Image: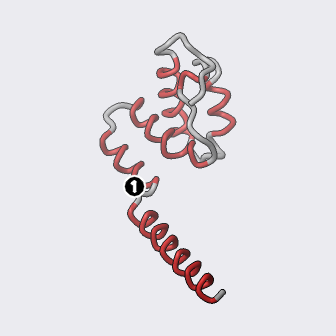
Amino acid sequence: MGNVLLGSLKILAVAGAIVVLAVACAPTLMQQRETGLAAATTDRERGEVYYRTSCNLCHALYMPRSFTPREWPRIVKRYGPRARLSQEQRELVLEYLTAASGESGESGKRR
């Protein structure tokens, strides 16, 4: 019984160390946002950065074509504040989503 407990504790210690290293080495969303914004040259690109670094905090990201250009404004208006996006950031996200959703005639496909 003692050896089983000791073995379990060792496994937990190793697993904990792996988690700590993974979290410490992974770029944070804020770092990803800063890097993306520095590289963005258009409002649409900035909107994509805000979308990818804010909207996935609560759910998996939807592909822009998941909704039509007419549907996105209602969605961004409702959920933008929950994602803690400023009005300017919501406008950029909306610009990205409506433009990207109109690039293909397909709609209703998620993720």
Name the residue: 43% across, 63% down. 22
The quadrant where residue 94 appears: top right
The residue nearer to you, when weighing 77 against 9, is 9
Which percent across, then down, holds residue 81?
64, 44
Q: Amino acid at mark 1?
A: Gln
Name the residue: 46% across, 35% down. 47
Q: Is residue 18 above or below residue 51?
A: below
Way the structure is coloured: secondary structure
Q: Secondary structure at mark 1?
A: helix
Q: Residue furthest bottom?
A: 2
Please give the count of numbered marks on the rendered protein: 1
Which percent across, then down, holds residue 67?
61, 22
Name the residue: 62% across, 26% down. 73
Q: Quadrant of the C terminus?
A: top right
Which percent across, then down, holds residue 11?
53, 75
Name the residue: 66% across, 31% down. 75
Which percent across, then down, holds residue 16?
51, 73
The residue nearer to you, when weighing 37 against 65, is 65
Kindly identify which residue carries mark 1.
Answer: 31
The quadrant where residue 36 appears: top left
The residue nearer to you, when weighing 88 against 108, is 108
The quadrant where residue 38 appears: top left
Q: Quadrant of the N terminus?
A: bottom right
Left or right of 21, for residue 66 = right
